[in-house]
């Protein structure tokens, strides 16, 4: 090992490479140090635990996936479709990323893992709500005290996650329900 310094971004990029090539189970501090060509202690200077390293890696992957998504314009149903395929594509680049994110994060450092997962998901739901609010074709009569826009977005998001977890090829059924309800 060279005794060179490394940066946080180099560490996260090495983690993402390992994740892409070998999956999450192969991610360990020694492999990351080897990829960065630094001593193991250098990695621990940035990340005192593997779970903290994993949290930052997952955060970086989410940013990479969502960076490609434009939440502006178009109809709500089209945005849901686009989001489905974008997350699906990200899951193909990072083997089982979505399943790992949903099943492993809450179990790791329970409070921190759950908070991170909720942060990512809430961010997406907030953006979907913005899309719904901007869609001029939505029938305003559909929403009331029994079904608010926030509840509808929660329903759509929960079903989107379910489809992704089940590794469905498309979200056509969900899109059908959305169209029948709000247009």
Image (cartoon, rainbow, N blue to C red):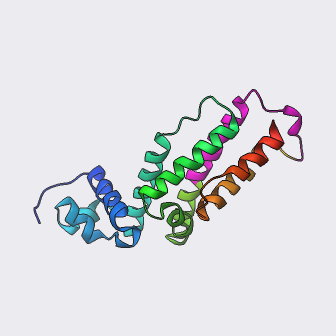
The residue lying toward the viewer, choosing from 72 and 172, is 172
Taking 39 as reference, is 80 left or right?
A: right
Taking 152 as reference, is 49 left or right?
A: left
Q: Which residue shows up at 66% across the image and 52% down it?
A: 171
Picture mark count = 0
Q: Position of residue 156 (x, y in %)?
A: 72, 50
The answer to whether 131 is drawn above or below residue 36 in the figure is: above
Does the segment drawn in magenta span residue 130?
yes
Does the segment drawn in magenta span residue 126?
yes
Q: Quadrant of residue 164?
A: bottom right
Q: Which residue shows up at 79% across the image and 32% down it?
A: 138
Q: Quadrant of residue 136?
A: top right
Q: Position of residue 49 (x, y in %)?
A: 36, 68
Q: Which residue shows up at 78% across the image and 41% down it?
A: 179
Taking 2 as reference, is 121 left or right?
A: right
Q: Quadrant of residue 74?
A: top right
Taking 168 as reference, is 134 left or right?
A: right
Q: Which residue shows up at 53% across the image and 51% down it?
A: 87
- Can residue 123 be seen in the rendering of this structure? no
- Per the rendered image, the range of residues in magenta is 119-146
The residue lying toward the viewer, choosing from 120 and 183, is 183
Q: Main secondary structure of the magenta part?
A: helix
Q: Position of residue 83 (x, y in %)?
A: 58, 45
Question: Could you tell me which quadrant the C terminus lies in?
Answer: top right
The answer to whether 42 is drawn above or below residue 149 in the figure is: below
Q: Position of residue 54 (x, y in %)?
A: 41, 63
The answer to whether 94 is drawn above or below residue 108 in the figure is: above
The answer to whether 152 is drawn above or below residue 97 in the figure is: above
């Amino acid at each position: 090992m060279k005794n060179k310094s490394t940066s946080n971004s180099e560490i996260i990029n090495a983690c993402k490479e390992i994740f892409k090539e070998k999956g999450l189970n192969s991610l360990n501090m020694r492999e990351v140090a080897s990829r960065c060509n630094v001593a193991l202690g250098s990695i621990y200077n940035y990340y005192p635990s593997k779970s903290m390293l994993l949290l930052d890696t997952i955060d970086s992957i989410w940013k990479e996936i969502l960076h490609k998504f434009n939440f502006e314009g178009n109809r709500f149903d089209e945005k849901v479709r686009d989001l489905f395929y974008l997350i699906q594509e990200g899951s193909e680049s990072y083997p089982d990323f979505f399943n790992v994110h949903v099943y492993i994060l809450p179990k790791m450092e329970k409070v921190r893992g759950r908070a991170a997962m909720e942060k990512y998901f809430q961010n997406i739901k907030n953006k979907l709500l913005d899309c719904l609010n901007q869609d001029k074709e939505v029938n305003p009569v559909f929403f009331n005290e029994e079904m608010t826009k926030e509840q509808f977005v929660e329903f759509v998001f929960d079903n989107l996650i379910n489809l992704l977890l089940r590794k469905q090829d498309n979200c056509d059924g969900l899109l059908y329900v959305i169209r029948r309800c709000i247009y």
